[in-house]
């Protein structure tokens, strides 16, 4: 009896082992098939990304003359870019008082992707003749490489007695810019090949490219909207005052009627 029991246990263990091997084999096959499906999806996604880039490139060409027309109109509006920057919740903090004086000379701002959109883009500030520097154009270029981002910028040719406002030098102070003290134009002074590019510089470029440039009117109108709102409040208060005066007059008339009675 004991021998029979031991034999049955060995048979059961063998069956269990075979079942386990079968399950493992089925699992491996399922995972391999799943990986094939994922590879196929990845290929489709890559093709879709390429198509999206082609469409985006096509519409960049369509947008260009419209942006040019927009720049012509903006150029006729005094202090447009200065107002838009100052009204922007992130960019406004980057401008010192001296920067604001320089920004009055901006006649256009342009953001342009490379023909190969994955390769990079440029941000260009165009200036009228001004007492601060010789340049009429300041450009910062971001080129995306396999080993990082190459950043180049126009050297600013400051006029005699001018320079980075508030005595700012080109040295970095830790990983963050001192927004309240440093000039916006230090952004052009920093150009390097990068894995360790100052984070704020990435952020400034991305905000200009992705937020300000597509619709600067949104931020230019911010201040005007607030003034309109304040004006409405004033009208409401004025109306309330008038209503109070009318109420007082009515009360006086009622009192006079009571006296006559």
Image: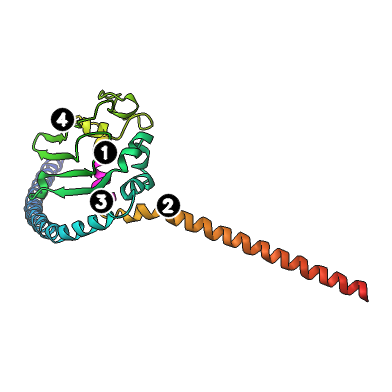
Find numbered disc 4 in the image and state the secondary structure of the residue it sits on.
loop
Find numbered disc 2 in the image and state the secondary structure of the residue it sits on.
helix
Say which of marks 4 and 3 sits in front.
3
Say which of marks 2 and 3 sits in front.
2
Determine the image quadrant of residue 63: bottom left
**Quick one: label 4 or label 1, which is nearer the N terminus?**
1
Which colour assignment does the render follow?
A: rainbow
Distance between mark 2 and mark 4 Cα atoms = 36 Å
Residue on which disc 4 sits: 192
Distance between mark 4 and mark 3 Cα atoms = 24 Å
**Quick one: label 1 or label 2, which is nearer the N terminus?**
1
**Quick one: label 2 or label 4, which is nearer the N terminus?**
4
Residue on which disc 2 sits: 223
Please give the range of residues in magenta: 204-213
Residue on which disc 1 sits: 130
The answer to whether one can see residue 127 in this image is yes
Residue on which disc 3 sits: 213
């Amino acid at each position: 009896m004991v021998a029979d029991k031991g034999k049955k246990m060995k048979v059961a263990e063998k069956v269990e082992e075979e079942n386990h091997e079968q399950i493992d084999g089925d699992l491996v096959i399922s995972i391999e098939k799943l990986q094939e499906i994922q590879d196929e999806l990845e290929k489709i996604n890559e093709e879709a990304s390429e198509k999206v880039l082609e469409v985006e490139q096509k519409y960049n060409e369509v947008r260009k003359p419209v942006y040019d027309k927009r720049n012509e109109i903006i150029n006729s509006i005094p202090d447009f870019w200065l107002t838009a920057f100052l009204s922007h919740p992130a960019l406004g903090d980057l401008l010192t008082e001296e920067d604001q004086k320089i920004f009055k000379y901006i006649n256009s701002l342009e953001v342009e992707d490379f023909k190969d959109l994955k390769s990079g883009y440029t941000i260009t500030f165009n200036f009228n003749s001004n007492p601060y520097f010789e340049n009429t154009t300041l450009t910062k270029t971001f080129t995306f490489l396999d080993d990082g981002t190459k950043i180049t910028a126009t050297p600013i040719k400051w006029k005699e007695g001018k320079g980075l406002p508030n005595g700012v030098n080109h040295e970095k102070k830790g990983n963050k810019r001192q927004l309240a003290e440093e000039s916006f134009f230090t952004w052009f002074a920093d150009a390097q090949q990068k894995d360790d590019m100052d984070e704020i510089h990435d952020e400034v470029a991305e905000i200009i490219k992705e937020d300000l440039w597509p619709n600067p009117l949104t931020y230019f109108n911010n201040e005007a909207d607030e003034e309109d709102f304040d004006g409405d409040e004033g009208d409401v208060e004025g109306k309330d005052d008038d209503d109070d005066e009318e109420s007082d007059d009515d009360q006086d008339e009622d009192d006079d009627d009571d006296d006559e009675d």
